[in-house]
Image (tube, helix red, strand yellow):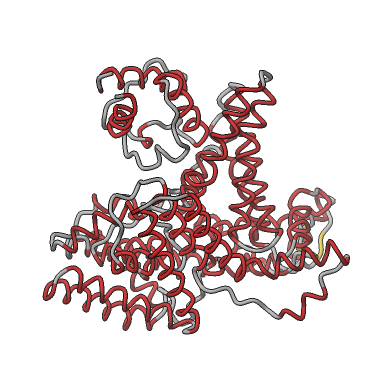
Amino acid sequence: MTPDQILETLTDVFRDVFDDNALVLTRETTANDIEEWDSLNQIKLILGCEQAFKLRLKPREINALQDIGSMVDHIHTLVA
Amino acid sequence: MLFSSAEFLFWFLPLSLLSFHFARAQWGGQAAMGTAVAASLFFYGWWNPPYLVLILISVGINFLWTKSLVRRPGLAKLLVALAFNLGLLGYFKYRNFFLENVDFLVNGNADAIGSLGPIFIPLGISFYTFQQIALLIDAYDEAVEAPPSLLEYSQFILFFPQLIAGPIVLYRELAQQFSNLEENHGAGLSLFGPGVAVFALGLFKKICLADGIAPFANTAFGAHETITLLEAWAGTSAYALQLYFDFSGYSDMAVGLGLMFGFRLPLNFDTPYRARNMIDFWKRWHMTMTRFFMMYLYNPLALSLSRYGLARFRHGGVIFIITVAVPTLATFLLSGLWHGAGWTFVAFGAVNGIGLIANHAWKGLKGPKMPFVLAWSLTILTVLVSFVYFRADSLTAAHNMLSAMFSPSAFILPNWLEGVAHQLGLEWRTLSMLSTGTYAVKCFFWVVALAILSVRMPNWAKTYDDLKPTWSLAFVVAFMGFWAIGWLDQPQTFLYFQF
């Protein structure tokens, strides 16, 4: 999977979790840019990513990720 | 030595800043950090020198453990380190509370514990313990690239602007700033100006606003046995504003001090009384504590329970309880207990946890979007109820306050409104808090003025990068600084220092 494909799939996961089909993700998007991003949605995002990318994330694995770009890169290393 | 005391402002702070920046210019970043650590130890020792030994032991042992975990992560090693830290915190902060409750359960009273004597909680222990625990877990998770040197670690934990009451900083927020300083391309004095502005705002919030409104809250909570409806609302509102300006004032001072030294510390308050729901409120109130609990407790718990719940159950209500209600309530009960060893703090956590669960349920059920005024009022009402528990000396005192706030029979007018009471057929008497019209008007003025300021005041701790050195800014900063210094004669301790 290329980083662009990961970003595309990630966008679908986010749209599903935030129930917003117009949501657009860029590598620079952060939690502060999405008003509805809260603790519960974060858990839903982890579960959504696990399902979409067929992987298992540790609970604190996304703590250190600063933005969507670092999330894409992190998933890229896991699925590569 | 309080940030708002003369010895700090006119003696300790100028000297520590001068020595830090002189050492940085003359001998480089490491020497500067050395002076900051030495100043921080002096600052901490000023209160109670024996507790320096405790914090140094804690820092020394945690430093070695962190280093070892970064090099070779291991679950057993992490668990021993966590047990050490939580054991230390438990012994000093929760020992009496725990024994009193055991005694109550076994013997039906807690009198025997009186022989233990009062417990003196080492200043800042909840904060420096959490900061060290966060780094230990990050090290175990392999989220720390290189182990900190002893100097970096000491500065990370002991740096006086954040040592006593936060913000709870993550190592990753400072690691790069330390490297930059050590390689002599740190922020230098470039953040000094904004730092002075943020600090002055914090000083003004604490001395002029929080300490100014505090007497109204103290009088109300002191008279909880005879308090009436109007007084209970006035006192609780006054306390909510005192707490906000006290702690956000302290946090602004911490961020401002960090900037004066060239360090960016994280934001702790983002105008929380503007929040339109409980989720929003906790994204804005004591943000670094919430972040700690979310990252290291709620997320692991909620994720495990979600995996468990989603794999076994189909009923939406059951899934909601397992995946949302249980982890949220558990997290907030523990965060309440973190504030203090008492059932009032547990109740504070419970009220907020229940508020958040209701908020998530409303969202989950796709309830209609409430008008802002209604949503905001419900949020503030929940927050006020929780703050009654937070402030009250006992559950009985809290329940006296709450029953006065919500019981129509407690609606009793003061004696100076006797005429109005007669006309409307209402009960009146001489009240313990609002005993004179002048006092009531003063209280009303303070509550309204501070309520407006709490939502309208600029948040420079968040926007300091946008501050421009204009005459108007200089005038405002000088005005706040002079006003605060003029009221310095009786510095009051910060509310969060007790935690």
Which residue does the image show at 32% across and 63% down from the upper left?
B256
Image coordinates of residue A3 in percent, x first then y, are: 25, 23
Which residue does the image show at 50% across and 65% down from the upper left?
B210
Q: Is residue B172 left or right of residue B44?
A: left
Image coordinates of residue B216 in percent, x first then y, are: 62, 66
* Vertical comparison of B237 with B221: above or below: above
Which quadrant of the figure has residue B478? bottom left
Q: Which is more toward the observer, B478 or B96? A: B96
Q: Which is more toward the observer, B213 or B431? A: B213
* Vertical comparison of B257 with A25: above or below: below
Q: Which is more toward the observer, B103 or B159? A: B103
Q: Which is more toward the observer, B151 or B231? A: B151
Image coordinates of residue B112 in percent, x first then y, are: 82, 76
Looking at the figure, which quarter contains the N terminus of chain B? bottom left
- Look at the image and tell me whether residue B20 can be seen: yes
* Vertical comparison of A75 with B127: above or below: above
Q: Is residue B95 left or right of residue B428?
A: left
Image coordinates of residue B343 in percent, x first then y, are: 71, 59
User: Residue lying farthest top?
Assistant: A21
Which quadrant of the figure has residue A2? top left
* Vertical comparison of B250 with B358: above or below: below
